[in-house]
Amino acid sequence: MHTAGLAARAAHTALDLLYPERCAGCHAFGTSLCARCEARLVPLGREGRCPFCAAKWDGLNHCDRCYQLHHIERIDAAFEMDGLARQLVHGLKYRRIRSLAAPMARHLEPFAAAHARAVWFAVPLHRSRLRDRGFNQSELLLEALGLASPAGSGLRRERKTEKQVGRRARERHANVAGAFSYRGEPLDGHDAVLIDDVVTTGATVAECANVLRDFGARRVWVVCFARKSYDQERHTDPIHD
Ligand SMILES: [Zn+2]
Ligand SMILES: [Zn+2]
């Protein structure tokens, strides 16, 4: 092992001693997510949901938002973005508890199996945000699933977009337009899957899908851990993410 690797491992061990692992749900010591809390997670049903984007929807057919998501075949989500699922998303992304990626990814395995032949891509972070956080949470989910993008290929976030939190759907689409690029082999008719920890309006994944389609992806699917539904009455996003 390289010295840098040893140093990193030593640092991790020191951190583990200072901050022993605690369950993101009940704060019990010993694991990032205990079995009892994990059992409380309620998988997203199809009832009362848009069949296309998985947002809460009690109308007929597609919800009002889906017209903005052309170039996406469907959004599959494991959970609604609330309760414990929300705590897990925040734990991984903001509290940087990397060990949550594995238990979170377990709930994405059925989707991974359904898209076994597709090429997978993580929704990228801008390099400055990547530097601040130290990792891309979507990439960690992808790795935890035992998947990877083809060597040397991937999406990049070229432009540092303003935070999407608190923006309305239309503003979010404008905010990310042209923000992504693709590097790698042409996708020549392959199906592609985008993975993200949470999908809110879908503006980011829709823009990534446009780019993958430009590079030859036949169909683009989206898989996410949590789906943040919108308020059907107000037709706007909730203020807090
Ligand atoms: Zn627990
Ligand atoms: Zn929809």
Image (spheres, helix red, strand yellow):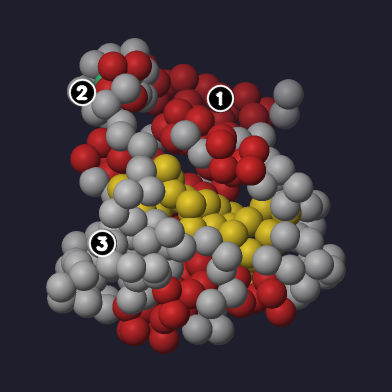
Label 2 packing within 10 angstroms: few (<14), some (14-19), many (20+):
few
Q: Nearer the viewer, mark 3 or mark 2?
A: 3
Q: CA distance from mark 3 to mark 2?
A: 33 Å
Name the image quarter holding residue 92.
top left
What residue do we see at 36% from left, 43% from top? 44
Question: Where residue 41 sits in the image (x, y, percent)?
Answer: 31, 31
**117 or 13, nearer to the observer:** 117
Can you name the residue that lies furthest to the top here? 30
First in sequence: mark 1 vs mark 2: 1
Q: Amino acid at mark 3?
A: Asp
Label 3 packing within 10 angstroms: few (<14), some (14-19), many (20+):
few
Q: Quadrant of the C terminus?
A: bottom left
Name the image quarter holding residue 221.
bottom right
As helix, strand or loop, the secondary structure at mark 2 comes to loop
In the image, the residue with mark 1 has its CB under 8 Å from the nearest atom of ligand 1 = no
Q: Nearer the viewer, mark 1 or mark 2?
A: 2
Q: Specify whether 227 is left or right of 237.
A: right
Q: Quadrant of the N terminus?
A: top right
Name the image quarter holding residue 152.
bottom right
Label 1 packing within 10 angstroms: few (<14), some (14-19), many (20+):
few
Question: Where residue 64 sits in the image (x, y, percent)?
Answer: 33, 76
Q: Is residue 43 above or below residue 130?
A: above
First in sequence: mark 1 vs mark 3: 1
Q: Which residue is mark 3?
A: 58
Q: Specify whether 47 is left or right of 132.
A: left
First in sequence: mark 3 vs mark 2: 2
Q: Are marks 1 and 2 in contact (CB under 8 Å)?
A: no
Q: Which residue is mark 2?
A: 26
Q: Which residue is mark 1?
A: 9
What residue do we see at 28% from left, 62% from top? 57
Q: Is residue 163 visible?
A: no
Q: CA distance from mark 1 to mark 2?
A: 27 Å
